[in-house]
Amino acid sequence: MTQPTSYGGRPRTPAPGTAAPERRIARLRGHGRRLLLSAVVLIAASGATAYYYDNLPAPFENWMLLSAAGATVLFLVVIPYFSWLSRSWTITTRRVIERSGFFGSNSREISHVRGYAIQMRRGILQRLWGAGTLTLSNGAEPPMRLKNVPHAALVHETLVDQVEVNQILAHRDSQAQGSGSVEL
């Protein structure tokens, strides 16, 4: 038996009955536009601190300026950045994995073989930036929401392809296992 050829750069399908290795297709985070305000605040705080250092009115001192700038940067730059950094989605050839949390990491996954419905929502600003929110629902578990995913249309197409390929492979493998038995 020959192995099927690949089309359009897709990886070759494994021979029937052999285990296919799980490969990572993409690792995603929410769109970076969420950090735009943080970048503006960081630039403004740096400029204001540099301008007013040793140039403050009489009742104020430099340590007060540095404390205010440090607190502003901490609450409006550092915490939003780590919040954005703490959530990611990984798409592999077998499943979609959602990881959230910085220290106590929570993980959730949904398998391509079981199949799921994919709904894509894109607001006006999301369309402008090429992002979107994908909702994956298999009916048995709570839906998985991939919020503000960059290149949402491409991710949607990739997920549809993976569900289709995994279901075809699962069906083919179940048929190959069933054909070896003899019925009386």
Image (tube, rainbow, N blue to C red):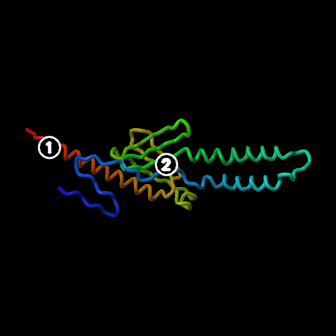
Q: Is residue 124 above or below residue 136?
A: below
Q: Which mark is residue 180?
A: 1
Which residue corresponds to mark 2? 146
- Please tell me whether mark 1 sits on a helix, a strand or a loop: loop
Left or right, 157 with respect to 173, comes to right
Dot 1: few (<14), some (14–19), or many (≥20) neighbours within 10 Å?
few
User: What x and y, as percent, mark residue 152?
Assistant: 48, 56
In the image: residue 37, left or right of residue 51: left
Q: Residues within 10 Å of mark 2 (few under 14, many from 20)?
A: many
Residue at the left extreme of this rendering: 184
In the image shown, does 82 or 61 lie closer to the viewer? 61
x then y, percent, for residue 100: 52, 41
User: Residue furthest toward the top?
Assistant: 104
Instruction: Choose between 169 and 156: the one closer to the eye.
Output: 169
Helix, strand or loop for disc 2: strand
| Residue type indicated by callout 2 | Leu
Distance (Cα) linking label 2 and label 1: 42 Å
Percent x, y for residue 120? 46, 53
Q: Which mark is residue 86?
A: none
In terms of depth relative to the viewer, which is nearer, 46 or 169? 46
Which numbered disc, 2 or 1, marks the residue that appears first in the sequence? 2
User: Quarter-wise, where is residue 110 in the image?
Assistant: top left
Residue at 76% x, 56% y: name it: 47
Rendered-image quadrant of the N terminus: bottom left
2 vs 1, front mark: 1
- Dividing the image into 4 quarters, which one contains the C terminus? top left
Residue at the image point whose x is 74% and y is 45% from the top: 70
70 sits left or right of 4 in the view: right
Q: Position of residue 155 (x, y in %)?
A: 44, 55
Query: Which of the two residues, 33 or 123, is positioned nearer the viewer here?
Result: 33
Q: What's the amino acid at mark 1?
A: Gly
